[in-house]
Structures are given as C-alpha cells and as structure tokens.
Image: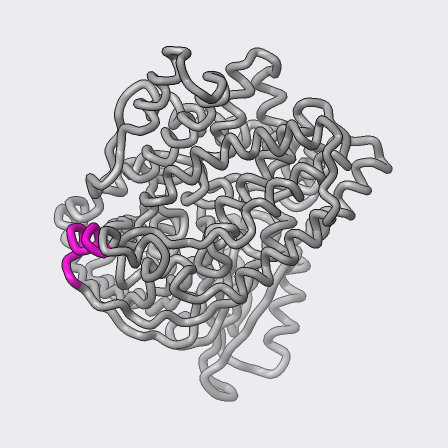
C-alpha cells in the first residue's frame, strides 16, 4: 500500500475487515523484511519515550533552553488535580500532558517527533491519557500508534508535515488529525468514523500559520499543542457520536496543501510574521539572538514518506525535528562518509538554519552529528565540549546556497587524510535529503542503507553494478549516478532494502575493477 489516499486506506480496512494498524504493520514487514515482533518492539520503545516525557514535564517544572518558556505543563497538571477547573479535570490533564512534552522538547530533552518536534505533544498526550484512563492496555496503545502513522503518511504524501512548507496547519493540524483518527479506532470506531475524525480535526486547523517567536519551537507552539490535544479528543468523540465530515478527508488534506501554498513566506516558520512580528515578539527575539537581519529563504520540494517511523519518530533530543534531529542526521551522514576522525569542519547555513541555529541547538546538533552521535544521544547538548576534547575545530557561517529547502547546510569536513563536502537539507520531521556530495548533484536520504560507490566511468558500468548487487541478493530501491566527465571519476548511489555487511563491501571492492571505494550510509 502506498499510503497516498485516506479513502483507499479506509476502504481497504473496511473490505478486509481489519484494523488500520494491521495494514500499517503488514506494510512495515514487507518493506523492512523483519518480523512483526521486532516492529512492535520498536514502536513500544517509541511509546516509552513519549510517556517518559509526559511524566517528566508534569511532575516537575521544565524550563526551555532559552529561558523564555517553561513550567506550564506542571502548573496545569497541579491545577487539574485540584478538581476546580472549568474544563472537566481529566480532559485538562490531556492539555497538561501535551504542554509537558513540548516543554521537555524545548529543554533539549528526549521526545518522539509525531510527526514533527513542533507538534510532538499532541499524540503522546492523548495516548498517555487513554492509558491512564484504564480503558486500554499498553499493548492496545502501542498498536494504535501504527494507525496514527498510517494517517500521517497519507497527509505527508498528499500535502506536507513541514511548517516551512505548509504552516502550522501542516504540523499541529496533522498531529491533531492523526490523534483524532487514532482515538476513534482505539475506541472501536469504524474506518468511516476514523475518516470523519480526521476530516473534522483537520478542517478546524486550516489556515493555522507557523509564526514562532524568534523562530523557536516555543511561543506559540507549546500552548498550541496543549489546546489541540483536547481538540483531537473532541473531534474523535464527535465522529464516534455519528457526526460526519461532509467534505471527505482526502479533499480536506488537499485543501490544506493549497492553503499552505498560498500562505505567505512570513507565516511559514520564518519567524517574521504573525506573533513573531509583534513588538513583544521582536523584543523576545532580540533578547535571545541580538538584533540580526533576516536572511532570504529558498524554496523546497515535497518529501515522500513510506514508513511508520517517518511519522512516529525519530526518538530525538529536542527542540526541533528539522533544526535539531535533521541537523544531527546531516552531520552524521558527513561523519560516515569521512570514515576517519574529523579534524576541522565548516558549516555554511542558509534560511532559518542561519537565523535561529543557536536557539534551536542546530549548531550543537550538527557538531554532534559530525562527531558520530545519533538523534537519541543525550549528550548532544554537550557537543561543543566534546569537540574541544576531541580536537575538532569548527566554524559556523551564513550563506545563500541556492534554491534549496529553507533548512539547508553545506558541511565541509576534513580528517587527517580525507575530506567530504556535503550539501543537505532538513525537510521536517527529522527527514533529510542530501543535495550534493563533493560537487556531484546526488540525492539520497540515508533512511535505507545507501551504498555510495566511487567508480571510473566506463561503458556499461551502471548495468554492471546493478547486476552485481542483484547477484548479491540486494533489491535496489533508488539509484543515481553522476560523473565529472566521460571516462573520468563518477559516483553511484544505490539505496537498497536490506542491510549491507562489511564483508560484502570488501568483496565488491576486491572483485570489481571499476570500483575505487564504497561507503555504506544509513541514519538511525
């Protein structure tokens, strides 16, 4: 299943009389070639991180890295426990849970992007609330996360889950729709009711702009997570009660995409318009960053999503899935390509990477990546200290790099013997895409094992490589090749569906004369 149409997904579930989560799990098994048990264990780990963030941010005050926000999750939790709220106290706890996760994120704590860090409080809030209600088992909650990922995949493929591309409706709106649909199936609703919940939730998020003060995932992002968690529960209850979304959910998703396309750039994650442009918003920005001029941002294309863990994940250190998790992954890809300890690195940043990299932790995230850390390493915030200890010299600069996605960086990494020049973009939700490698225009993500093969350009070289990989048992999901000149140096990138053992790499280099070097790249 391609997960490009909610109507198709719901019809398949109805015709096969199977829950949506089973269709998603089946797709994961087919894609990854691993067992059902392994897939569920990984999602169980994701939920454990979600719950941990909820408990951390409600049982104590958590303050953001900038000091601008914090403590509201704990404050609202304590208020709800007193039983004197206007909103039913149990529902108010859902909002407290969402605030808590978002505050842990702003503190560079460990969260799960769902589907992004900016909207990471909504799904954990409604699921932990459902668990605490005693109506559902932990196993049921974990399985329901596959329902959420299936809904999120459709939204991501038909529209966007990136605030830079579609505004906050694409992040918080998508998360609200995912949570609403998930709750309906969890409560025993029909596929049709799931679709109605998605439509109801998403249509009431249309036009929501992405206007983060100072470009940070704090104001108004944290409070929006809290309110939209309750909205998700309300949308689910409306659907279960028989309320119908007269505009089909696929059409609502399409409209969200259109609205995002018409939304001015100042209201799409730039930190320029909306609340960010108010006098107080500007004052807070100056408090954090000083008085810096904005840099013109470039455009970007849509990402293609296939796996549940592209929507529920990655497990990451906050505060931003694009500015932190994506930055770690870009740096880590450069580290894998260098294949030796790094000695010096220059980061050239554009767009919102350039204007907010210190507040978002993009600087420490990129450094952590080139040092070999992954998105879930808790010592990401200590990357500058680690760089000093390991003798890594680093420089950050701002440049206009071309017409790429707004969150793009050029990484120029040097070791004792090798160098790597990597231009890559962070597309949202932790998803990244390499744009150029050592001057070659090659695109790959590292989500699947990617063989970066340096060869001598010869007639039949590509066909030969494909045949050899087939003979070794690999299925090529994506392949690209670029050369400097006919008969000169060339690079082929082959993304394959299964893990590549080091022995296979050694065998290929030994037996295939045109191959000069192979590096296997894969992000966590």
Q: Is residue 408 left or right of residue 394?
A: right
Measuring from the top left, give residue 463's x and y in whole percent. Answer: 65, 73
Q: Is residue 220 magenta?
A: no
Instruction: Find the residue positioned furthest to the bottom.
Output: 486
Measuring from the top left, give residue 108's x and y in whole percent. Answer: 29, 39
Pick the front one: 118 or 394: 118
Quadrant for residue 464, please give it: bottom right
- Span of residues in magenta: 282-291
Q: Is residue 16 left or right of residue 19?
A: right
Q: Is residue 289 magenta?
A: yes
Residue lying at 24% horizontally and 57% vertically, measured from the top left: 342
Q: Main secondary structure of the magenta part?
A: helix
Measuring from the top left, give residue 209's x and y in whole percent. Answer: 45, 54
Residue 316 vs 208, above or below: the answer is: above
**Residue 276 in sight:** yes
Residue 295 vs 221, above or below: the answer is: below
């Amino acid at each position: 299943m391609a997960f490009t149409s909610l109507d198709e997904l719901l019809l398949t579930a109805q015709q096969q009389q199977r829950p949506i989560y089973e269709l998603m799990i089946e797709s994961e098994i087919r894609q990854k070639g691993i067992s059902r048990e392994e897939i569920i264990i990984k999602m169980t780990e994701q939920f454990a991180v979600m719950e941990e963030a909820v408990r951390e941010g409600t049982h104590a005050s958590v303050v953001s890295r900038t000091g601008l926000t914090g403590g509201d999750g704990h404050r609202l939790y304590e208020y709800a426990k007193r039983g004197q709220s206007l909103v039913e106290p149990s529902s108010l706890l859902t909002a407290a849970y969402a605030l808590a996760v978002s505050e842990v994120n702003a503190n560079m704590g460990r969260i799960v992007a769902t589907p992004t860090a900016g909207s990471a409080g909504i799904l954990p809030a409604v699921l932990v609330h459902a668990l605490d209600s005693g109506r559902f088992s932990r196993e049921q909650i974990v399985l329901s996360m596959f329902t959420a990922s299936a809904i999120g995949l459709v939204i991501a493929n038909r529209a966007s889950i990136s605030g830079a591309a579609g505004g906050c409706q694409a992040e918080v709106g998508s998360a609200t729709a995912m949570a609403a649909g998930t709750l309906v199936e969890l409560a025993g609703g029909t596929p049709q009711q799931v679709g109605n919940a998605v439509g109801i939730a998403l249509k009431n998020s249309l036009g929501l702009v992405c206007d983060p003060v100072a470009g940070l995932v704090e104001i108004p992002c944290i409070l929006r997570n809290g309110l939209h968690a309750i909205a998700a529960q309300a949308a689910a209850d409306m659907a279960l009660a028989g309320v119908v979304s007269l505009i089909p959910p696929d059409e609502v998703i399409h409209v969200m995409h259109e609205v995002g396309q018409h939304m001015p750039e100042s209201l799409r994650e730039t930190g320029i318009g909306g609340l960010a442009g108010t006098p107080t918003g500007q004052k807070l920005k100056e408090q954090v960053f000083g008085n810096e001029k904005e840099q013109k941002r470039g455009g970007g294309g849509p990402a293609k999503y296939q796996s549940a863990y592209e929507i529920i994940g990655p497990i990451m250190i906050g505060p931003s899935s694009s500015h932190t998790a994506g930055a770690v992954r870009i740096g880590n890809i450069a580290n894998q390509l260098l294949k030796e300890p790094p000695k010096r690195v220059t980061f050239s940043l554009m767009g919102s990477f350039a204007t907010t990299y210190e507040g978002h932790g993009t600087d420490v995230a990129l450094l952590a990546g080139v040092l070999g850390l992954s998105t879930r390493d808790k010592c990401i915030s200590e990357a500058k200290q680690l760089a000093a200890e390991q003798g890594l010299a680093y420089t950050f600069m701002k440049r206009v790099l071309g017409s790429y996605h707004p969150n793009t960086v050029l990484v120029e990494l040097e070791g004792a013997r090798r160098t790597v020049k990597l231009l890559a973009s962070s597309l949202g939700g932790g998803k990244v895409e390499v744009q150029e490698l050592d001057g070659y225009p090659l695109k790959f993500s590292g989500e699947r094992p990617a063989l970066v093969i340096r060869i001598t350009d010869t007639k039949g070289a590509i066909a030969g490589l494909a045949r050899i990989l087939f003979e070794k048992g690999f299925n090529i999901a994506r392949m690209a090749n670029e050369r400097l000149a006919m008969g000169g140096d060339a690079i082929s990138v082959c993304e394959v569906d299964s893990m590549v053992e080091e022995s296979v790499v050694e065998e290929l280099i030994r037996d295939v004369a045109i191959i000069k070097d192979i590096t296997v790249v894969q992000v966590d």
